[in-house]
Amino acid sequence: MYHYHHLTEFHGLPVREFGGPEADHTDVTDHGAVAWRLSVEPYGATEDFGSRFARFRETVELERTSALIVGQWDKSGVDPSEVLRLLEENRDRLPSLRALFLGEIVAEEQEISWITQSDVTCLLTAFPRLTELRLRGGHGLGLQPVRHESLRHLIIETGGLGGDVVRALGACQLTALERLVLWLGEEEYGATVNAEDLTGILAGTHLPALRHLGLRNSEIQNEIAERVAVAPVVARLTTLDLSMGVLDDSGAAALLEGQSLAHLHGIDLSYHFLSEEMAERFANAMAAVGVEADLSEPQDGEECDCDADGAEECDCDEFRYPAVGE
């Protein structure tokens, strides 16, 4: 879910907020022993992001920094492409950087659909040793197909993800990637992705090390389940996550009728719209082959009153929503 609190740990390190000009970091004797969080206040910022980054560069031993979180920036009038430029320009001073979270902005600061990103391809080309990349916000997000031989974990959290980004991911050669998680979202909040856009990812041709796949938070979760049920990449996975979306009985049935899932350690369908009968059937089927299935957070959706309006046809799917949109 979209969080209301900032991370306290990232990449196995405690998070240290860099803070404003009054912040004191003399107690940090090893600048590589923490994950630095660099952000400006969402409202009434006394220092813009560019100025704070300049002070960060002068204060912290960048050469030792292994994990960096970038939080709020655009409330200070800074374009996201400027944030990327600052990171790229300082790549030679960040030789130890292994983990980056761009857009760690929480719900009380800004809705996820309002977070503006930019083309993040330069992060992968500038930091070839990066092993973990996490992005939040899909508005303006871009990516071009690249080859990266170190990235192991990639998470993109959005209320609406572009189909062009998903297609680009499918064309990227991410030879070390073990964990891929995408929050796909809904059209109302910017999603243009369709099931066909997932072809490259589900083929798995360029993802030889992939072991965990999360295609979450989608209004087309049933179509995704149908594709996953016959996807070549599934055979090499150990865990599969189709949670947070509008999955109902038809999607669950497709998974049961498709390729065997007996090799999985676990499958996550939490936050779903399955009937009690189908939830029980799915859970029993997975238990029979030793697969742990998470079917928590069943949803009812909003009550449909089409009959009251005298409508002859009714699409009650419009009363079901992914877990995170706006």
Image: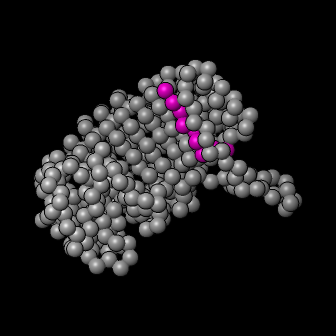
State whether residue 160 is above or below residue 82: above
Q: Can residue 125 be seen in the rendering of this structure?
A: no
Residue 232 lies left or right of residue 42; in this view the side is right
Q: Is residue 49 part of the magenta span, yes or no?
A: no
Q: Is residue 164 above or below residue 258?
A: below
Q: Position of residue 53 (x, y in %)?
A: 21, 66
Q: Residue at x 28, y 48 (%)?
A: 13
Judged left or right of residue 150, residue 326 is right
Q: What residue do we see at 68% from left, 40% from top?
A: 274
Return the residue nearer the eye: 226 or 164. 226
- Colouring of the image: one colour
Left or right of 278 on screen, residue 148: left
- Residue 46 in sight here: yes
Q: Nearer the viewer, residue 137 or 7?
A: 7
Q: With 145 as the anchor, is 115 left or right in this view?
A: right
Q: How many marks?
A: 0
Residue 235 vertical position relative to residue 116 in the rendered view, above or below: above
Give the x, y percent position of residue 141: 39, 57
Residue 272 drawn in magenta: yes
What residue do we see at 26% from left, 76% from top? 47
Quarter of the rendering containing residue 206: top left
Residue bounds of the magenta highlight: 265-273
Q: Which residue is at a point 44% across and 28% down the rendered structure image? A: 237
Out of 323 and 141, give the one closest to the viewer.
323
Q: Please name the predominant secondary structure of the magenta segment in the image.
A: loop
Residue 111 placement (x, y as % from top left): 48, 65
Where residue 26 sits in the image (x, y, percent)? 15, 63
